[in-house]
Amino acid sequence: MNIILSGVGGNGVVLTTRIIAEAAVMEGINVRVGEVHGLAMRGGTVVSHLRLGHDAKGVLIPQRMGDMMLSFEPLEAIRQLKLLKRGAKVIINNDPYIGVDAHLGLSRYPDICRVLEQIQETQDLVDVPATHLAVEAGGVVMTNVVMLGTLSASRELPIRREVLLEAIKSRVPPHTIDKNIVAFELGEKAFQEWESSRACQVKQ
Amino acid sequence: MAKKNRILGGAGEKVLLTGNEAIARGCLEAGVVVATAYPGTPATTILEKLGDVATELGFHAEFSVNEAVAFEVSAGAAMSGVRSLMATKMLGVNLIADPLTVISVTGVRGGLVIITADDPQQFSSQNAEDTRFFGMLAKVPVLEPVDGQEAKDMTRYAFELSEELELPVFLRITPRICHSSFPIELGEIHPPKRNGKFLRDPKRFVMISTFSRPRQKILNEKIAKAGIIADTNPWNRTFNFQNGRAVDDNKAYNTFGIIASGMTFPYVEEVLEVTKVNARVLKLATTYPLPQNLVTEFLREMDQVLIVEENDGVTELLTRALAQRKRLNVRIMGKDEGLIPMSGELNPDLVGDALEKLFGVQFREELTEPYIKAEKELVSQRVPALCSGCPHRASYYSIKEALRRKGMGGSIMGDRGCYNQGAYAPLEGIDSCICMGASIAMASGISHSGTNEPVLSVIGDGTFFHSGIPSLLNAVHNRSNIVSLIFDNSITAMTGHQVNPGTGVNLMGVHTGNANLKKIVEACGVERVQVINAFDTKRLIDAVMEEIDQPGPSVIISRSPCALVVERNVRQRKLKMYRAEVDLDKCIGCKVCMKKIGCPAFGWGDDPKPHLEILPHCNGCGLCVEMCPFGAISVPEKREGALGISVKPREVRE
Ligand SMILES: Cc1ncc(C[n+]2csc(CCOP(=O)(O)OP(=O)(O)O)c2C)c(N)n1
Ligand code: SF4
C-alpha cells in the first residue's frame, strides 16, 4: 500500500509519517518511508512517501501508484496529485497556508474552492477542518493527530486503532496524551460526519 | 517526548530507523572510538545520534570546526589504532581532498570510515558532484548500500575492510538513504576499545617526498587488492528476473543485463517486476574499485547491458574500460546513450522510461488530462523565506537600507547558511553564494578589481569559524576595502541547529566556553570592529553607512540568536510569547511592510477592508513595527532580552 503525506514545513508531516510507520512495524508490517524535508526553516513544501507491505522495497512511490493521500494543506495535495491512482482517497486539512510570497505576487495561491473541486474531479476527497478541530482539542500542534484520527476512521490503513494510538502516545509529550486522544477522536468524528453526509447525497 | 533511544535497541530487535540512524548504529556495532563530522544535510544526524550516546558508551564524538579538521582528527585516531568515523555531505569531501590523498598513501591502522552523502537531486547543495571521483583520485574504496539495513551492516563491514586494507573506506549514501526509514534488525553493540597508541614509523607517516614515493606502489597494490576482495563482497549479487520474479541463481540465461549501481537496485527490481522484462541484474555495492572478475563474468554472457546509476556515469565509465580491456563484445548503455538522465536523482519511473525506450514496455502510469490540468493551472512553487523573527531579516533590511541611502549601488557577496534565504524577494540581500567561506575573499577580489562601488560581504558565525577566518586575515594582510558583516546567531542553524565554537557547548554537552568572535576578528588585525544587536536597525544602518566610507577592511558583527532557538527557550521556560498586533483603523492595506521585509508571519485579511493580518507563528521580534509608515503595527512588549536568552543546543535538538 502506497500512502503520500504532504504539507508545508511546521505541519508535522515527518512526525506523522513516523507515527504511522512505527505503528505498522508494531503490527509486523514491512515499511519504507521516503522523505524530503529541506532546511531548518518553516513554510516550504514537505512530502513523504510511506509504503506498507511485503512488496515495499524502494522508498519512492511511482507516478499514479499512490493508494491514498493525507494532506495537511490543500495546495500541497495538488502538488502531489500525480502520484495518486484515480479514485484514491485524499484526506485533506482544508486550512490553506498562503505564504507572504503569494500576497506579494511572487507566487500564486489558487482559489481554495477551485483546488478542492480539482481534487474531487479525480479523487475521493475527505476534507476536514483539522486545524479548527485541533484548536478545539487544545492546540494547533495537534492538527496532525486530528488527521490521524480521520485516517484511522477511514479504515484504509491495515493498522488497528489501538496500535495507532499507542504509536501516537509514544511520540507526544506525556502530559498532553489526554488532549491528543481528544484530538484523535475529533478526527474520527469528522470522518463519520463526512461519511453520513455522503450517504445523504447518495440517497438524494 | 518519549526518550527511549532507538539506536540503542537490543541485538535481534527490529526497529524503525532512518538510514542515518542505521549508520550510527552500525558504528556502535563496530565499536567506534572516535566519530567526527561537520554538519551538512543530509548527513548531519549521523553525528547527532552518535553524540547522544557517546558519553554513555564511552567514545568520543565531535562536531569539528570544518570537514578537513574533522577528517584529520579521525585520521589521527585511526593512525593510533582505533576505529574512527568521519561523516560529511559530499561538499565536505572537497575540503578533505588534501589530507585524504596523503592519508591513503600512509594508510591507517584502526579502521577509518568516511560517510559521504551525495545529493544528486540537490535538495540542499550548491552542486551535484559525485564523490566516487574522490575515491578514484585518492585510491580509496567506495561502498554503496541500497537501504537502511545494508547501510548499517556495511558501516560495520567498512571498518573491517579498512583494517584489512589499512586504507580509509568511503560509504557513499544519498538523501534517499539518510532521510528514509526502514525496519532494521539490530546486531550486537561492541563497547569501544579506547586503547589507542600512536606508534612512531616515520617512513610511513612522515610523507616527505623521499618517504612518500616508495609508498605509491603499496597504495596501488592495496587498491588492486580491494578489487579482488570486492569480487566476494556479499552485497554484490546477481539475480535473474524471469517474468517479473527474481530468481537468485547464478546461471546466465538472459542476454540483456542491468548493472544497478548503488541504491538504484530497488527501483530496477520494481520496474522489472511490473514490466516483466527478462534480465540478469548485477546489484553493485562496491562501485570503486569494480569487482573485476564478477563484472567480467557478468558482461561475458551479455549482448547488451544497461547501467543504472545516479550522479555521473562512473560505473559506466569503469565498465566500459573493463569490457575494452577484456575484449568483450557487449553493448554498454546508460547515460552516454541518453537512456538514464545525466543529472537529478533516479526513481522507478525514470528507470521504467529507459526500458520503454529499449523494449517498448510501459512502466509509468500515464498522466491523464485532469492531472495535467491540475499541475499546469494550480501548482506554483512556494518561495522559501527566512523564519518569522529571524535576525538575518533585520540585518538584510539594514544593509539594503544603508546602501539605498548611500545611493551608490554596491555588491554583497554572500556565503552559505540560513541567510541564503535572504536572496529571494523582497529582501534580495545577497549577490552570490558559492561555497562555505567564499564571501570575504570574493569581496576582496571585487574590491581590488577597480570598482568604485561599496563591496560588502555576509557570513554566518558557523561559516566564519569553518572557513572565513583565513579570508579575513587575508583581507587585512592585503588591504581589501570591504565591509564584512558576520551574522552571529551563535549556532549553525541551517543544518538544524548544531553547536559551533561560538555556542559555548560541544556535541558531548561539555561547556568549553564561547569562542570570542570579536576578539578573533581583532586578532586578525581588523581595526574597525563593532558588535550590534541585529534588531537595532538604526545603529546597524548607521554603522554600515559609516564603514563604507572607511578605507581597508572593517567588520560588523550583527548579533541575535536564531528565532527558532528563542521560541524553544521561551516555550521551555514557560515565558510569554508576544505577537505583533495590527490596528485596523491605521492599516490602509498598502502592503509596504510586506514589500520591505516579507515576513512569513504576515497574512492578509479582507474584512471589512484589505489589511495586514498577523499569523499565529509570529514571535514578536518587532521588526515590522518600524516598517509601517502609519504606525499600524505594534508589539505589546518588544521581546526583551532576546540576546540574554542562552542557547542550549542539547535541549534544542529534536
Ligand atoms: C563544505 C560544506 N559543508 C557543509 C555545508 C552545509 N551547510 C550549509 S550552511 C551551513 C552552516 C551555516 O551556519 P552559519 O554560517 O552559522 O549560518 P546560519 O545557518 O546559522 O544562519 C552548513 C554547515 C555546505 N554547504 N558545504
Ligand atoms: S532557523 Fe534560525 S537562522 Fe535559520 S531562518 Fe530560521 S530563525 Fe533564521
Image: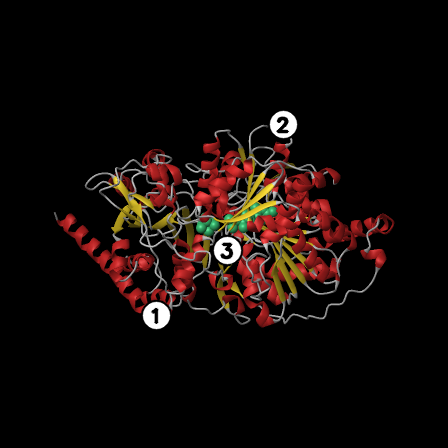
Mark 2, residue position: B450
Which chain's residue wears label 3?
Answer: B
- The answer to whether mark 2 and mark 1 are in CB contact below 8 A is no
Q: Residue at x 49, y 47 (%)?
A: B418
Quarter of the image where one finds residue A157? bottom left
Q: Report the mark closest to the observer, 3 or 1.
A: 3
Mark 1, residue position: A175
Cα distance in 3D space between marks 2 and 1: 64 Å
Q: Is residue A116 visible?
A: yes
Mark 3, residue position: B497
Q: Compare residues B287 and B110 and report the one nearer the observer.
A: B110
> How many neighbours does mark 1 have within 10 angstroms: few (below 14), some (14-19), or many (20 or more)?
few
- Tell if the residue under mark 2 belongs to the same chain as the one under mark 1: no
Cα distance in 3D space between marks 3 and 2: 39 Å
Vertical arrangement, residue B60 with respect to residue A198, above or below:
below
Quarter of the image where one finds residue B80? bottom right
Assess mark 3: CB under 8 A from ligand 2? yes
Which chain's residue wears label 2?
Answer: B
Residue B228 in picture, x, y percent from top left? 74, 53
Secondary element type, mark 2: loop
Cα distance in 3D space between marks 3 and 1: 26 Å
Give the amino acid at mark 2: Gly
Residue A5 in picture, x, y percent from top left? 38, 51
Secondary element type, mark 3: loop
> How many neighbours does mark 2 have within 10 angstroms: few (below 14), some (14-19), or many (20 or more)?
few
